[in-house]
Amino acid sequence: MRPELTLTPDERAHEARLLEVICAHIAAAGGALPFADFMALALYAPGLGYYSAGARKFGAGGDFTTAPEMSPLFGRCVARQCHEVLDVTGGSILEFGAGTGALAATVLETLAALETLPERYFILEVSADLRARQRERLAQLPAPLAARVAWLDRLPETPLSGVILANEVLDALPCERFVVRSAGAHRLGVGLDAAGALREVELAEVLELPEGLEAAALPEGYRGELCTALRPWIASLAAILERGLVLACDYGQPRSALYHPDRLDGTLLCHFRHRAHGDPLVNVGVQDLTAWVDFTAVAEAAVDAGLEVAGFATQAAFLLALGIERDVAGETVETARYARASEARRLLMPTEMGESFKAIALTRALDLPLTGFALQDLRSRL
Ligand SMILES: C[S@@+](CC[C@H](N)C(=O)[O-])C[C@H]1O[C@@H](n2cnc3c(N)ncnc32)[C@H](O)[C@@H]1O
């Protein structure tokens, strides 16, 4: 499916500059780049990738909206889960990929009201553009809260106690794509056609699929994604988390549902001006690329790295358990209550974000029932 919307002249020029860089990489790689390398450049090439450069990205004038952008209700629930953990562990919060800073702002304000502020609120953000937006947004917090925020270039070298947050970060990690043939799952890549335009190419290399997933059990021509960056990312968090919780929220499924033989075309989606489509080779650098998360892979990597999988639930069950309904009912101004009620519907409805988004809790040395996972326990599906 091709998107119908056309680019502005500035967007065209931006795309042309990024395509020049990508073409140089394709040439250096001998004619084709693995899809994950293409995706890494399209999203994160310094100064040019979708996240690295200045595209608006979030909200009504951008390409997509995330839960913390849509409503403070999401951040308040996340804050209550942090409160429960910080009460026991003390320490800090580290947020990965903080977008515009919306979640950080709501979490800090809610924790201040609960009198459980973290020692520091660290943000690890790969995009210089978003880092600047986060600084601007969080500078508007009351000074004692703003003073706790610090940006990191890499994971801290000293152990961390507290909470690590990642909302819609795992779906933005570059992933491999494959197509099933009789010899196995062939890696897909990006090359150039005779006119010099990007085209998908099927590489000879066969990818090793994760445990429980047999290429022979999938139909010929079946396409899927594989996020090889997930395992090292989780291992790196496990290496620094001394005591506490990693809370990751994202859209995704357990492996058996994600790679269901009926889902013939994978889950890679491109977001451009609030339209979703399936062609990553257009609008390069001006559209978002995402793929659903294999939550079984998250759980396996966590257990292998010495963490415990303490909870797995739909976003709806997670937010309901943390009192989202009380937040809506507690709004004293009628117009605000209506606005919150409509936001809650979008966060909770199965046809919106309620079911496709999941929350997973990975813990270390935390013998504590987590309220966010008290209503639903989907761990047996992982
Ligand atoms: C879809 S946005 C989500 C932003 C925000 N968490 C929210 O929910 O609104 C993905 C974010 O992850 C960041 N990101 C992607 N890979 C990352 C990594 N390896 N480390 C830190 N941030 C990353 C992006 O720059 C961006 O801020």
Image (cartoon, grey):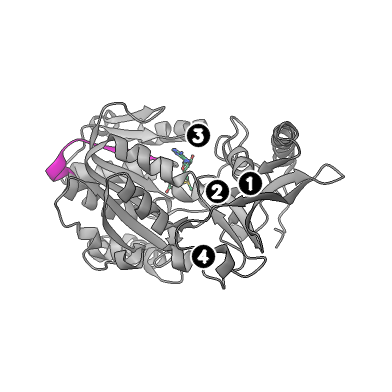
- The residue beneath circle 2 is 175
> Type of residue at label 1?
Phe
Q: Which range is magenta?
A: 86-97
Camera-side residue: 247 or 364? Answer: 364
Asked if the residue at tag 1 contacts the one at tag 2, i.e. Cβ–Cβ closer than 8 Å, the answer is: yes
Residue at (45%, 67%) from the top-left corner? Answer: 256
Report the Cα–Cα distance between label 2 and label 1.
7 Å
> Are there few (<14), some (14-19), or many (20+) residues within 10 Å of tag 4?
many
Element type at mark 1: helix
Could you tell whether 363 is left or right of 61 in the image?
left
Quadrant into which the C terminus falls: bottom left
- The label shown at residue 259 is 4
Where is 356 relative to 45, above or below? below
Q: CB under 8 Å between callouts 3 and 2?
A: no
| Residue receiving disc 3 | 127
- Identified at 87% across, 45% down, the residue is 194
Q: Please name the residue that numbered disc 1 is placed on.
A: 35
